[in-house]
Image (spheres, rainbow, N blue to C red):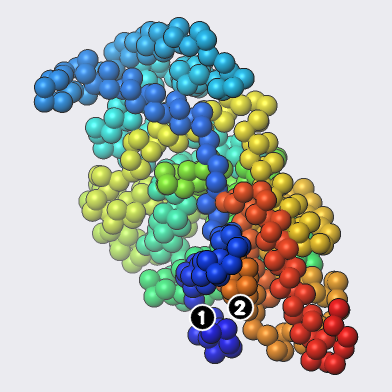
Amino acid sequence: MLDRNFYDSLSDLSPFEIKDELIKLAKSSSQKSAKAFLNAGRGNPNWTATRAREAFFLLGQFALTEAKRAYYDPKAGVAGMPPKDGAHARFEKWTKKLLQNTADWDEEDEGIPPAKTLSDAVNYAITTFRFDADAFVHELTDSIIGDNYPVPDRALHHNEIITHEYLMWAMCAGHRPKAKFDLYPVEGGTAAMCYIFKALKNARLLNAGDTIALGTPIFTPYLEMPELEDYDLKTINVSAEQEDRFQFTDEDIKALENPKVKALFLVNPGNPSAVAMDPDSIKRLVDLVNKKRPDLIVLTDDVYGTFVPGFQSLLGHLPRNTIGVYSYSKYFGCTGWRLGVIAVAEDNIFDEKIKAHSEPIQKLLEKRYKAMTPKPREVKFIDRIVADSRDVALNHTAGLSLPQQVMMTLFGLVELMDVEKAYQKACIAICTKRFWNLIEGMGVESNPGIYFDHYYGIIDFEFWLRKYVGEDVVTWVKDNIHPLDIPFRLAEDHGIVLLNGSGFDAPSWSARVSFANLNDEAYSQIGRAVRSVARGYVQTYQAAKGLKIS
């Protein structure tokens, strides 16, 4: 099965589709041998953040007592809706009683009592943000019960304030802007991508035939979505090469000077490069926008920013031009919760561009949004994203589910209270240890630098063969072996699944490994397997050239 024709038939597939073939092959291999099946292809973390979840599930119990306060038929199992007046006092009394029952609680072994986490989070929010205590507790109880539509539909009032502060830490810890952002909580980063693409098209900010730039390597949907007939966009690549430590050079940025390039889409830190933009790269882009391209639309997907201490997002450096995307999935181990957020500065170029449209386009847009408001031309871009996410006609039922928004609130509050950043340090330590286990297993040297997030890694066979063996071997391998042989060889011979780097517009002779989803020891095994595959290529070259096999 492992021949060039087979590989060629798969070349146009997304790596996430190819992985299904790899999984079948790897499982079959592991069943025939004593080797474990190891899937390091997908980035679902194998850790979960406990404190916010403990608070969430406890809050649900309190919310039920509140619902029963309004009305309760125990025989039928029917309750009312949580009341607002006096909610905070009742909450304090309820949590105090729970804490009295934890007198023998051992925080060293059992962690902080959930009731204390919940109580501290609520009081922290009330004190820090000067919330009306009853209004905030009522938002939590009514929302976690899930008995109402989201109101406001874009974001709950208190959740937006808390999430804004969390994002300023998660995305802009190293460079906090003065700008204030409007937020739209959504069903994970994937929903954010879909909604933004749709809204940019509907607002006529990106039209069929327009050119956008992609900062490559990049998460595969950003490569695939522009080509859909829905958008029909042309793309150019602004490539961050491994030789440049995955940073953008002056030459890379120069391509953006062309006014035909309407937008730049980035994942920062990269996926799969796992490297955040350094100050020099950021400055190059900021200078370009400020001096030559004040009209450039920037979309930055910063889901992995929390794995780089002091991370700096373009959202902080170019707030007027930038749409920010953040997902809670990876950092908090909550891919199943589907939590993400879109951020757009109150002062932005998107609203300006919409207002500058010609009268015929204005009339088209006016017709699209007239059912929402008597003044459709005044609808902000962020609110157009909300409306378009529900095809406008269902705008009145838009918004992320309220229990999800409560989970988002609690994740944010617990992180903001963690002044020592113990949780962040623990997550980074998990990925870092696994990275070094892989490097040791491969038998190579590496100096990833301070902007490497250790969540993913690109194993570039061409780069490593050139460094450790020589150009002759690289040339021969490229002439005689298909790049997809790398992941298929790992699957067939070692029961290991990695994704092909070419699917991310990374170097063709590379594979992406996730450091998030397997135990520590597995990465030593993966490293040895990668070394074995590379050694096999070298020995095949030696045999073909009549050289001594080493």
Which is nearer the eye, 290 or 77? 77
Instruction: Write down the residue under mark 2.
Output: 484
Q: Label 2 amino acid?
A: Leu
Residue at horizontal 79 percent and vertical 80 percent from the top: 538
Kind of element beneath mark 1 = helix
Query: Which corner quadrant holds the C terminus?
Result: bottom right
- Residue 251: x, y in percent? 75, 69
Label 2 environment density (alpha carbons within 10 Å; few <14, some 14–19, many ≥20): many
Q: Spatial distance from mark 2 to mark 1, Cα to Cα? A: 9 Å
- Residue 497: x, y in percent? 57, 65
The image quadrant of residue 392 is bottom left
Residue at horizontal 41 percent and vertical 12 percent from the top: 98
Instruction: Say how many tags the image has.
Output: 2
Lower sequence index among marks 2 and 1: 1
Q: Are marks 2 and 1 in contact (CB under 8 Å)?
A: yes
Residue at horizontal 67 percent and vertical 51 percent from the top: 521
Q: Is residue 290 above or below residue 427?
A: below
Instruction: Write down the residue under mark 1.
Output: 10
Which is nearer the eye, 385 or 85? 85
Q: Is residue 432 left or right of residue 49?
A: right
Is residue 199 visible from the viewing direction of this image? Answer: yes
Which is nearer the eye, 168 or 459? 459
The image quadrant of residue 249 is bottom right
Q: Label 1 amino acid?
A: Leu
- Residue 110: x, y in percent? 55, 22
Is residue 260 visible from the viewing direction of this image? Answer: no
Q: Is residue 141 above or below residue 314?
A: above
The image quadrant of residue 172 is top right
